[in-house]
Structure formats: structure tokens, C-alpha cells
Amino acid sequence: MINLFDLFKPKENTENPIQNMSPREVKALIGTKGVTIIDVREAAEYKEGHIAQAKLMPLGTVTNHVAELTKYDKVIVVCRSGNRSGMACRTLQSNGVKNLINMSGGMMAWAQAGLPIK
């Protein structure tokens, strides 16, 4: 019997899976060659505090940056709680960006871990 919900569930991309990492794991990767970090929150949220190396790319604009992001070995995606970054990762993945990392818990978890905020 076919489950109708399965027909509408997005298929997992097993060739290009999205990785989830904790803020501490992400911190260890920042500054590594071939790694970039993008913040998909809105400009006002970014101004309130962000990871120093993060580039602002609001969620609604990420598809405009696909060509740029495909040049990196790893793309770390951050938001406030991990929700929008997950959406951004799926959007980027469906547009051919590989090696995506969603930072679990977003900036809330980053701050909770006591990591530096600019």
C-alpha cells in the first residue's frame, strides 16, 4: 500500500547529503582553506551579532549566490535557530551546491556555547 505522505515528502539527496554540526564543530572549521560561512538571517539580525567570518546572505537571496558558493569545498550555513539555515541548505543543495553544513541550533546555540560574537 502506498503512503500518500511519502509522495510529497522531499527525497533525501544521498549523493550530496547535508551535514549537521554543532557550533563547536563549526568553530573548528572556520578559517580552514576552502571553507566559507554564510548567515541567512536578515540584515537587522546580523547587525545585532554574528560570527566574525560569516557573510550575510539573507534566505531570500541565497539562489543569487549559487555560482559563488559552488567554488568552496564546504559551505557552513547559519541562522538564528537552525530553521532557516536548514531551508537554505535544501535550496542550495537543489541548485547544485555541494558539501553543505547546517549549524545546529543557529546563533542561539553559538551564544549558549560561549563562542565569540561580533
Image: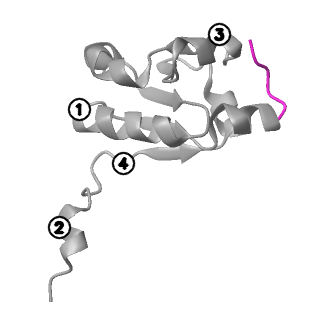
Q: Are marks 3 and 1 in contact (CB under 8 Å)?
A: no
Q: Quick one: quadrant of the C terminus?
A: top right
Instruction: From the image, tell me which residue sits under label 1.
Output: 96
- The residue drawn where x is 50% and y is 13% is 56
Q: In terms of secondary structure, what is the magenta stretch mainly? A: loop
Q: Amino acid at mark 3?
A: Lys
Instruction: From the image, tell me which residue sits under label 3.
Output: 47
- SS label for mark 4: loop
Which dot, 3 or 1, sits closer to the camera? 3
Q: Are marks 4 and 3 in contact (CB under 8 Å)?
A: no
Q: What distance separates the C-alpha of mark 3 from that of mark 2?
A: 41 Å
Q: Which mark is residue 17?
A: 4
- Which span of residues is magenta-colored? 113-118
- The residue drawn where x is 45% and y is 28% is 74
Q: Amino acid at mark 1?
A: Gly
Which dot, 2 or 1, sits closer to the camera? 2
Q: Position of residue 25 (x, y in %)?
A: 66, 38
Q: Which mark is residue 7?
A: 2
Q: What distance separates the C-alpha of mark 4 from that of mark 1?
A: 12 Å
The crowding category of the residue bearing disc 4, from other C-alpha atoms within 10 Å (few below 14, some 14 to 19, many at least 20), is: some
Q: What distance separates the C-alpha of mark 4 from that of mark 2?
A: 20 Å
Mark 4 / mark 2, whichever is N-terminal: 2
- SS label for mark 2: helix
